[in-house]
Image (cartoon, helix red, strand yellow):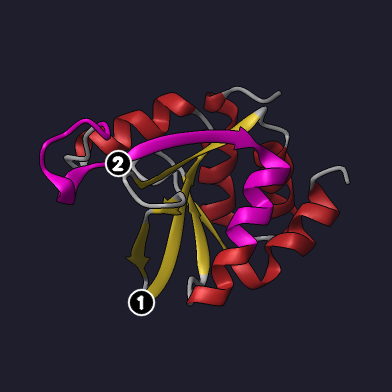
């Protein structure tokens, strides 16, 4: 399992170089993580991942560690589901990477266009339309 520092370094290199090789190495490391953590809205009948707009695209947020997701949620003013303010309630859900990939792929049906990983630290992005292919190629499946 890659450490967070190496994922940050790979993200910086991929964002700088924009080469297929650098992006492939980065996604291989991201898919090798034990789990991904998503932030979603609590209090709904089913988990609804939080989305944001990035470069005019509607993106789902995911993180390669629970600590990163917690730090992002705190920085954005999102609180645990016990918060009395329904507008800033959130929950963090960590899941195995294959399950996260499947859930994120399902979001295409409601208009989510991309995946924004590790926002707030060393972000990187992928279109959801290609996420299953990325996982097949770089996820060791």
Res 24 visible: yes
Q: Nearer the viewer, mark 2 or mark 1?
A: 2
Res 18 visible: no
At x 52%, y 54%, the residue is: 15
Judge whether residue 20 is colored magenta: no
Judge whether residue 99 is colored magenta: yes
Query: Contact, CB < 8 Å: mark 2 with mark 1?
Result: no
In this view, 14 is above or below 76: below
* 66 left or right, relative to 72: right
Q: Which numbered circle lies on residue 56?
A: 1
Specify the quadrant that holds the N terminus.
top right
Q: Residue furthest right?
A: 141
Q: Position of residue 28 (x, y in %)?
A: 74, 42
Helix, strand or loop status at disc 1: loop
Q: Position of residue 70 (x, y in %)?
A: 34, 29
At x 11%, y 43%, the residue is: 85
**Residue designated by label 2:** 90
Q: Residues within 10 Å of mark 2 (few under 14, many from 20)?
A: many
Q: Position of residue 32 (x, y in %)?
A: 73, 34
């Amino acid at each position: 399992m890659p450490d967070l520092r190496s994922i940050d370094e790979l993200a910086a290199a991929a964002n700088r170089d924009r080469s297929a090789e650098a992006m492939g190495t980065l996604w291989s490391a991201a898919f090798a993580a034990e789990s991904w953590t998503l932030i979603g809205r609590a209090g709904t009948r089913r988990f609804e991942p939080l989305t944001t707009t990035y470069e005019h695209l509607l993106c789902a947020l995911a993180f390669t560690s629970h600590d990163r997701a917690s730090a992002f949620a705190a920085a954005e003013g999102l609180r645990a589901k016990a918060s009395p303010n329904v507008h800033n309630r959130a929950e963090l859900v960590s899941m195995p990477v294959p399950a996260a990939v499947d859930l994120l792929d399902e979001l295409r049906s409601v208009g989510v266009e991309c995946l924004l990983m590790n926002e707030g630290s060393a972000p990187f992005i992928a279109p959801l339309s290609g996420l299953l292919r990325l996982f097949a190629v770089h996820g060791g499946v």
